[in-house]
Each structure stands twice: as structure tokens, then as C-alpha cells.
Image (cartoon, rainbow, N blue to C red):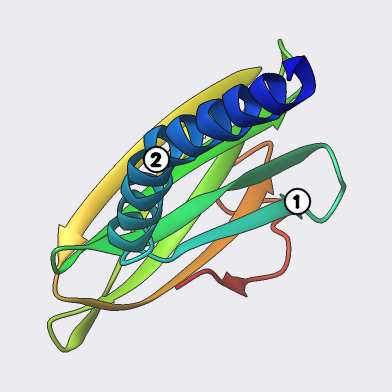
């Protein structure tokens, strides 16, 4: 009799637990579906030609806007590292850069972007530049 009651109680608790877990599993699935609409591209490490500075980061598109978050690393003190971005936006190319000394985190975004390239330089805006990579 005790075994029968124990089995019935265990089966009942598993059924209740299964019902409680099912809505949470469904909610997690729905969340991941909505989160997967933005494809995140992780990129880097992209070094300068002398390997004294590098950049890495991620780029993604959400609601028609392209976002880029980047990280720059070089030895603190002395010369600066430079990251360049070349962006094809609304039918024309735009070029911009950011400098840092040590470690830096930066971000930018924009609408109408079709392509994004990046490369890293060290000791000057145009010195010791590494290879150019497409990141979007």
C-alpha cells in the first residue's frame, strides 16, 4: 500500500512539475526567436602590420540600423593605436578613425549602411597599418 501511494505521489509531483516547466520552456523559446532576428558578427583580432596594436569587436543590424562595438589594445604609453572604419552608406563611401593609448572601448551606429571594412594602425594614423577586413 505504501509503495502504491509513493508511486502515485511521485507521478503526481512529476506531472505538476512538468506543467510548471512547460510554460517557462515555451517563454525561453519565444525569447530566443525574437533575439535571433539580429545577427551578431564577432570579428578580430586584427593587428597592425608590426603587431603592436590590435582591434576586435562585434557588428550587428537591428531595426534597419547597423551597430558596431569595438575594442582597441596596445601597450600603454608611447605611441597610439588607430582603428579605421570604411563604411558604404547611402551610395557613397565614408571613412573615419579613432585613436587610443592602452585599452579603449568604442561604439558607433548608423542607418543605410551596406558594407563596413576596418583595419588597425599603430604609431600614427597612416603608419604600420594592417590588413583591411570586411566586418559587415
Residue linked to disc 1: 48
The percent coordinates of residue 27 (x first, y second) are 31, 46
How crowded pointer 2 is (Cα within 10 Å; few <14, some 14-19, many 20+) is rated as few
Residue under the point 72% across and 13% down: 76
Q: Quadrant of residue 63?
A: bottom left
Q: Residue furthest top?
A: 77
SS at mark 1 in the image: loop
- The residue that label 2 is drawn on is 19
Q: Where's residue 129, x and y in %?
A: 69, 57
Q: Nearer the viewer, residue 27 or 133?
A: 27
Q: Residue at x 64, y 26 (%)?
A: 10
Indicate the quadrant containing the C terminus: top left, top right, bottom left or bottom right: bottom left
Tell me the tag on residue 17.
none
Find residue 50 and report its horizontal and vertical position in percent: 87, 48
**65 with respect to 106 (left or right):** left
Residue at 27% across, 59% down:
34
Q: Is residue 61 above or below residue 78?
A: below
Amino acid at each position: 500500500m505504501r509503495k502504491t501511494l509513493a508511486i502515485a505521489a511521485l507521478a503526481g509531483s512529476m506531472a505538476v512539475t512538468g506543467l510548471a516547466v512547460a510554460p517557462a520552456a515555451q517563454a525561453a523559446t519565444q525569447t530566443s526567436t525574437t533575439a535571433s532576428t539580429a545577427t551578431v558578427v564577432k570579428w578580430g583580432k586584427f593587428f597592425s602590420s608590426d603587431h603592436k596594436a590590435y582591434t576586435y569587436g562585434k557588428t550587428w543590424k537591428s531595426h534597419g540600423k547597423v551597430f558596431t562595438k569595438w575594442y582597441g589594445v596596445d601597450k600603454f604609453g608611447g605611441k597610439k593605436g588607430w582603428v579605421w572604419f570604411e563604411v558604404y552608406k547611402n551610395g557613397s563611401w565614408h571613412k573615419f578613425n579613432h585613436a587610443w593609448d592602452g585599452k579603449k572601448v568604442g561604439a558607433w551606429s548608423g542607418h543605410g549602411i551596406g558594407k563596413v571594412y576596418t583595419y588597425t594602425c599603430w604609431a600614427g594614423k597612416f603608419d604600420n597599418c594592417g590588413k583591411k577586413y570586411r566586418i559587415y
